Amino acid sequence: MQLQDTVAVIVGGGRGLGRAIALGFAEQGATVVVAARSTDEIAETVWLIEEHGKQAFAIATDVRDSQQVAALVQETLRVAGEPQVLVNSAGIGRRAPLLETSEAMWDELHSTLLRGTFLVTRAFLPHFIEQKRGNIINIGAPVEKLAMPGFSAYSAAKHGVHGLSAAWAKEFRRYSINVNVVHPGGFANTRLMREAAPEVNKGLIEPDAVVEAAIYLASQPPRGLTGEIIDTSLWQVPVAS
């Protein structure tokens, strides 16, 4: 199993891509910490993992709140130990034309997708630095396909996630920490996307399409693959030489 003896924190693991990754990591032997705002959803993810005889913990967290993020780190250390993998998958779906986009809507999107990624990564980073290893996986988006009416706020936030990841990959390299982005290459069959774009009802990509690539990124060695944006609709597992 590729992730045996690994502790992985999945932020946004209550549903969608985050849940699929959490289940995939557990199947590969990882101890999984599942964090999100919805206690019911993260409890269900943990139940699904435990049904297969694997270990997981649910920690309710609002990634927009730095105090709750700090508590997530401490509770992770208490129940699971030092993490080696972090997945930033927290997301919300909001779509509106610019003239109907309120400041509150803009702020909610950016505080969840962008500020949340910043706060969570900053909070866990000292523990990765201490171990001189770590794999950070940020969930991106096929941003070119988001250039459609109503998605300007969401698209801007996801562009921001890609930008953070590229800069962090270079910044964290000296600590032997890898930072990569993964996305399904199209609209995923998740509640978020079904609510935001109900007219897109054909060709939706199942959440587990990102799992294989996420496992590959989570199992990278120190100073391994970093700074990549992986579109899983175009990606295949590299064959070992």
Image (spheres, rainbow, N blue to C red):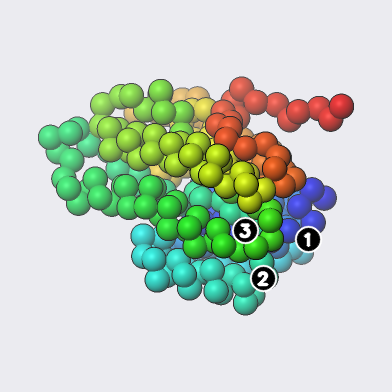
The amino acid pointed to by label 1 is: Asp
Nearest to the eye among marks 3 and 2: give it. 3
Task: Determine contact: label 2, label 1, CB under 8 Å.
Answer: no
The amino acid pointed to by label 2 is: Ala
Residue shown at 67%/36% (left/top)?
225
Mark 1 vs mark 3: which is more N-terminal? 1
The amino acid pointed to by label 3 is: Ile
Disc ID at residue 5: 1
Residue at the far front in the pictured view:
174
Q: Identify whether 96 is placed above or below 128.
A: above
**SS assignment at label 2:** loop
Residue shown at 18%/40% (left/top)?
101
Mark 3 vs mark 2: which is more N-terminal? 2
Task: Determine contact: label 1, label 3, CB under 8 Å.
Answer: no
Disc ID at residue 80: 2
Between the residue at mark 2 and the residue at mark 1, the CA separation in whole angstroms equals 11 Å
Mark 2 vs mark 1: which is more N-terminal? 1
Left or right: residue 239 compared with residue 99? right
Task: Determine contact: label 3, label 2, CB under 8 Å.
Answer: no
Question: Nearest the camera: 221 or 187?
Answer: 221
Residue 76 % position (x, y): 59, 70
Residue 205 % position (x, y): 54, 32
**SS assignment at label 3:** helix
- Mark 3 Cα within 10 Å, few/some/many (few <14, many 20+)? some
Between the residue at mark 3 and the residue at mark 2, the CA separation in whole angstroms equals 18 Å
What residue sits right under mark 3 in the picture? 129
